[in-house]
Image (tube, rainbow, N blue to C red):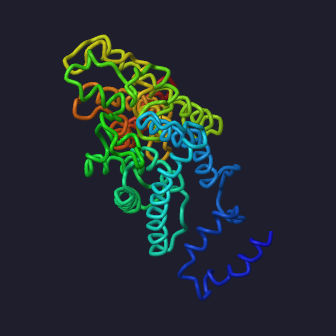
Amino acid sequence: MKLKESIDRIKPNFEKGGKLYPLHSVFDGFYTFLFTPNETSRSGVHIHDANDSKRTMITVVLALLPCMLFGMWNIGYQNALATGSPDRSVFALFLFGLLTVLPQIITAYVVGLGIEFIVAQIRGHEIQEGFLVSGLLIPMICPPDTPCWIIAIAVAFSVIFAKEVFGGTGYNFLNVALVSRAFLFFAYPQKMSGDGVFVSLGDSATVHGFSGATPLGQLASSTDPSTVTLTNVDGSPMDFMQAFWGLIPGSWGETSTFCILIGAVILLATGIASWKIMVSGVAGGFFMALLAHNFASPLYPVTYLNPWEQLCLGGFAFALVFMATDPVTACRTNIGKWIYGFLTGALAILIRCYNSGYPEGAMLAVLLMNCFASLIDYCVVNTNIRRRQKRLVAKQSIK
């Protein structure tokens, strides 16, 4: 390959002793992005398979593609509903969405990778591939019209304070993308919630009587949720299948449960994500939604939403599949994964149902359980140790 031959010729300049060695980390980052490294372990005992961190990140990106492509189309579709645009061809709607979110994606990657490159140079470390996924997740969990400068600030905050200060990729205990979302939610709440932020109006921002609130936002803003009829941005009634397919307002990567399920199948088939966390998360969310649905309260009347609707609305499914399963921030033990997933799902619905100031719950639930993941693993491991010690003592007493 001529490209590889050309790069190999200048490679010695970036190796130890070369005149460009101070930029070794930057060169290595680009080199390993373009080509598979051919270095092998020379000592110690190592178990290898065909997978590595780069292939893992690429697989997650591929799993995100259905959500990403549909989300771009849905941005154009919601715009057409809100503005009454006559051009509703697939290409026109997709192009509108692509042009809307492309600056956000570029901003996230430029800022996040820029910081990682600088930190790698300062520390003399290799550049890791972790932000390849985070740089895509962050825009996908934000409203489509989020200003790029706000995304840049949120990315810088999360990469520096939630990742690099702990040592970089593999050492962070909080999900980087969700830290960005949490920062945006608390620092710029007017840009993250409301009736107009989840539908991009383009040049038609003067539409009168427009409401782009998400279904959960419509319910949270009502004085009597039991009497609310969920509506689309054009005023037509919203049904469960529209929520399942994703034809609703919301953060553009989270709306389609169907596309999220496709991503889940890819992650499970490749062994990237834990099915224990996904299954227990759905069980925990369904259990809490069932309790809330059968025990009325002033905040949550019984006619609010049924359990299946709860699982399909908001960012619950997206967070459970792509963020709660993050192997760095989730539990590592098998029993711990069941506990972690169940509590994540239950807390997400609990926060959603009984906190009128925050109609969504997935973000806070995952971040909270990230903080307890290590403690859960610690308790599970020590419980196993004590049980084995008792078993050993019992065997010795019999002898």
Measured along the vertical axis of the image, is residue 55 above or below residue 367? below
Q: Position of residue 292 (x, y in %)?
A: 30, 17
Is residue 267 left or right of 216 when viewed as pictured?
Answer: right
Is residue 210 left or right of 266 when viewed as pictured?
Answer: left
Q: Which residue is rendered at x = 67% and y = 51% of the image?
A: 47
Q: Nearer the viewer, residue 226 or 74?
A: 74
Q: Is residue 386 visible?
A: no
Q: Position of residue 349 (x, y in %)?
A: 34, 27
Measured along the vertical axis of the image, is residue 288 above or below residue 137? above
Q: Nearer the viewer, residue 144 or 332?
A: 144
Measured along the vertical axis of the image, is residue 157 above or below residue 137? below
Q: Quadrant of residue 379?
A: top left
Is residue 321 left or right of 185 when viewed as pictured?
Answer: right
Q: Which residue is rendered at x = 77% and y = 75% of the image?
A: 5
Identify the residue at the far front of this view: 86
Q: Is residue 115 visible?
A: yes
Q: Which residue is rendered at x = 44% and y = 64% of the image?
A: 111
Q: Nearer the viewer, residue 397 or 77?
A: 77
Q: Give the tally of numbered discs.
A: 0
Measured along the vertical axis of the image, is residue 278 above or below residue 378? above
Q: Position of residue 164 (x, y in %)?
A: 40, 62
Which corner quadrant holds the N terminus?
A: bottom right
Q: Quadrant of residue 222?
A: top left
Q: Position of residue 376 (x, y in %)?
A: 38, 37
Q: Nearer the viewer, residue 219 or 352?
A: 219
